[in-house]
Image: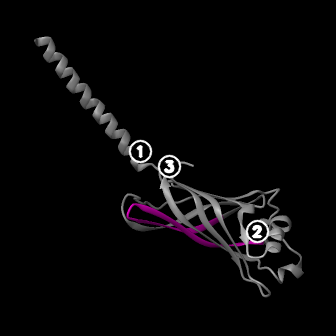
């Protein structure tokens, strides 16, 4: 009977320690999560005197790591769809050379704190680096993360200069297309990896 009690005490102590270890692991996993989106809406727009340039892609990927305070965006360049087929052809073949440079990326870090388990709006300043057309360019961009009813919504809107990425066109073409490009990215992030 004494050995049975010692066995019961050992089991109780073992189960308590195991419960504490599991609790610590689960709580740290909840604090450091990765959020991803395999389909984000990306719109590029460039006003121009003759015709505005506008294209949309739904093929970009976003990864937010709340532990490292990092965000990554990757866009297949040839996924942009234009209203006019000729614009799309020129965009891919003559300007961004999507066969040679198939993706545009951004990798950035932020300093602000946020709790994605609590409803709220979090304004972040992402300091990072773009890689477009084979050119790296440091830039800070604003980003808003909105948490509502356990949905995490990502949104950013910023401007880029095509010349910063060595995307050039003859002067005659520049009168048709703009040099400054507005980029709007938005979508819903979910817990997990891509």
Q: Is residue 176 left or right of residue 71?
A: right
Q: Single out the mark in the foreground, 1 or 3.
A: 3
Q: Quadrant of residue 135?
A: bottom right
Q: What is the span of residues highlighted in magenta in the rendered image?
A: 139-162
Outermost residue, left side: 1
Q: Residue 177: x, y in percent?
A: 79, 79
Task: Determine contact: label 2, label 1, CB under 8 Å.
Answer: no
Q: Earlier in the sequence, mark 2 or mark 1?
A: 1
Spot occupied by residue 107 in the image (x, y as percentages of width and height): 62, 57
- Residue appearing at x 15%, y 14% in the figure: 4
Label 3 Cα crowd, 10 Å radius (few <14 / some 14-19 / many 20+)? few
Q: What residue sits right under mark 3 in the picture?
A: 192
Q: Is residue 118 left or right of residue 105?
A: left
**Residue 146 covered by magenta stretch:** yes
Q: Nearer the viewer, residue 72 or 150?
A: 150
Left or right of residue 35, residue 161 in this image: right
Secondary structure of the residue carrying numbered label 2: helix
Residue at the extreme bottom: 49
Q: Residue at x 74, y 82 (%)?
A: 52
Name the colouring of the figure: one colour
Residue 78's spot in the image, x, y percent?
75, 62
Viewer-side label of 2, 3: 3
Crowding near pointer 2: few (<14 within 10 Å), some, many (20+)? some
Residue on which disc 2 sits: 164
Q: Quadrant of the N terminus?
A: top left
Instruction: Determine the secondary structure under disc 1.
Output: helix
142 in the magenta segment: yes
SS assignment for the magenta stretch, majority = strand
Q: Give the mark, 1 or 3, whose residue is nearer the N terminus.
A: 1
* Pointer 1 residue: 29
Q: CA distance from mark 1 to mark 3?
A: 11 Å
Q: Position of residue 14 (x, y in %)?
A: 26, 25
């Amino acid at each position: 009977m004494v050995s049975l009690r010692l066995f019961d005490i050992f089991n109780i102590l073992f189960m308590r320690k195991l419960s504490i270890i599991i609790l610590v692991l689960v709580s740290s996993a909840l604090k450091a999560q990765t959020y991803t989106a395999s389909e984000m809406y990306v719109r590029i727009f460039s006003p121009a005197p003759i015709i505005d340039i506008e294209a949309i892609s739904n093929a970009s990927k976003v990864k937010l790591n709340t532990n490292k305070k990092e965000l990554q965006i990757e866009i297949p360049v040839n996924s942009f769809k234009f209203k006019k087929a000729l614009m799309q052809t020129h965009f891919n073949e003559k300007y961004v050379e999507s066969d040679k440079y198939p993706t545009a990326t951004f990798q950035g870090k932020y300093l602000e704190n946020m709790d994605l388990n609590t409803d709220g709006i979090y304004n972040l300043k992402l300091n990072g680096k773009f890689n477009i057309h084979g050119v790296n360019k440091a830039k800070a961009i604003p980003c808003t993360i909105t948490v509502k009813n356990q949905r995490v919504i990502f949104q950013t809107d910023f401007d880029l200069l095509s010349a910063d990425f060595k995307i050039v066109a003859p002067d005659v073409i520049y009168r048709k297309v703009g040099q400054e490009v507005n980029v709007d990215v938005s979508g819903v992030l979910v817990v997990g990896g891509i």
